[in-house]
Amino acid sequence: MNDEQMMDADEPVYVISIAARIVGVHQQTLRMYERQGLLTPWRKANRRLYSRRDIERVRQIQRLVADLGVNLAGAEVILRMSERLQEAEAENARLRDEVGRLRGRQLPAARE
């Protein structure tokens, strides 16, 4: 397993200059996304640190804006709805597992 695979997707590792270079935007763009509430980098001693998940989120914003013509407010709504959908799907899977577990513990119904 290489170092990148071992690193948690949420671990803040990139300073703003590196994050901006990775996604091909100016640092001010990342700051604007933060002001708009689209991105929440981790902060330490007044420095912004970005995770791989943050980088992917910026790429999603870029796709929505560039490919679909969505404005930043629309991108925010789409991203939040996508997050809520993922949370709902995870909860649904958890509940299905719980139902399956409970069904496995039930005694068979008595036959008359």
Image (cartoon, helix red, strand yellow):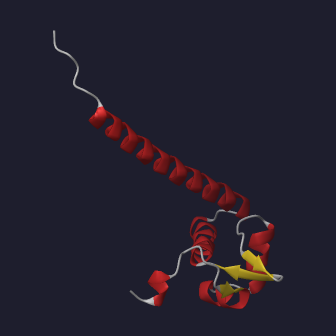
Quadrant of the rendered image containing residue 103: top left
Is 90 or 1 nearer to us in this picture?
1
40 vs 37, nearest the viewer: 40
Residue 75: quarter of image: bottom right
Q: At 78% across and 77% down in the image, what residue appears?
A: 31
Front residue of this view, candidates 26 and 38: 38
Q: Is residue 54 above or below residue 107?
A: below
Q: Give the residue drawn at x 43%, y 41%.
A: 95
Q: Residue at x 75, y 79 (%)?
A: 29
Give x and y (percent) for residue 60: 58, 69
- What is the quadrant of the C terminus in the image? top left
Spot the residue most to the right.
Answer: 46
26 in relation to 88, above or below: below
Figure quadrant of the N terminus:
bottom left
Residue 46 is left or right of residue 79, and the answer is: right
> Could you say which quadrant of the image residue 51 lies in?
bottom right
